[in-house]
Amino acid sequence: MPAIRLFGLPTDINSSFERGAAAGPAAIRAALRSDRGNLASELGPEIGVDIAFADDGDLPLGEDTPRDDAAIRRHVAILHEDGEIPLALGGDHAVTFPLVEAAAHCFGPLNILHFDAHPDLYDDFGGNPRSHASPFARICEAGHAARLVQVGIRTLNRHCREQAVRFGVEIVPMTDFTADRVPVLAGPLYISIDLDGLDPSAAPGVAHPEPGGLTVREMLAVLHKQTAPIIGADIVEHHPGRDIGGVTAIAGAKLVRELAALIDRNGTYRP
């Protein structure tokens, strides 16, 4: 089974409204290691016991997007060369672009499962084409997505609707949502989880809360039905300054455990 390497990306320089997500990796990591819980997953295996799992800590990112992107790409490339699976903690959602770019360089175009309240397809948000509102536009226009399925979307404006049509994005909105409406994707599979895809009652600690979102149980149902080998994943946009009682960090830590178990269960991707 593949070894999983957790690492943090403490940057929020591409946040469009309010910074704070740079502190997300440390908060999720603290919840993961807290004695309030344990490291077992609902799929059965336990991190560090049944699942090969290591934590590389946070990458030393700065206030320079091109330099940070290069550091992220290098780290992911090294992990893939060693046959390990990157599991990244953001940081704002802009980090998903270099994560996917590096994975696509190794595996070719990816099938991507993206959980979010927002489609993040803006061509250029607020004069910043690398905004956290734009990573999937950059991913699609670069040809890194063979298939992009977005789950939990509930703020689709005209521009992003046009972008979704342009790029052939498959959107599963929250209106009349059931897990059965989400397809089972083939490999190589990449999973990106923006914590604001969850309803604010389950994840208040985000900069852009949007009512009417996924429950944790619905998100897990979609994840657990995926059977393809996973070549990378990220959990992004936790803003500890907006959290209440640490519940968003706890949800993030649970998702780390469940993603690790899913990566372990689904095995290694072989072209």
Image (cartoon, grey):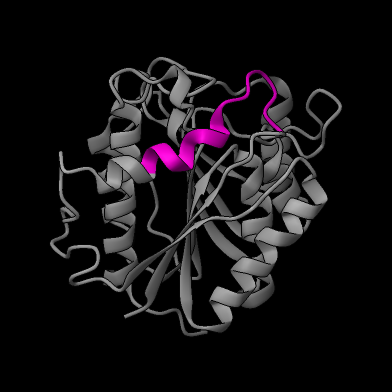
Left or right of residue 187: residue 146: right
> Is 256 located above or below residue 75 in the figure?
above
Left or right of residue 10: residue 158: right
Q: Which of the 4 quarters of the picture holds residue 228? A: bottom left
Does the magenta segment cover residue 24?
Answer: yes
Q: Which of the 4 quarters of the picture holds residue 257? A: bottom left
Left or right of residue 52: residue 44: left
For the point 18% across and 70% down, the residue is: 49
Residue 220 at x, y percent in the picture = 27, 45
Left or right of residue 265: residue 105: right
Viewer can see residue 144: no
Residue 70 at x, y percent in the picture = 75, 60
Foreground: 126 or 18?
Answer: 18
Residue 268 at x, y percent in the picture = 40, 79
For the point 68% across and 68% down, the residue is: 74
Viewer can see residue 236: yes
Provide the residue span drawn in magenta: 14-28
Does the magenta segment cover residue 176?
Answer: no
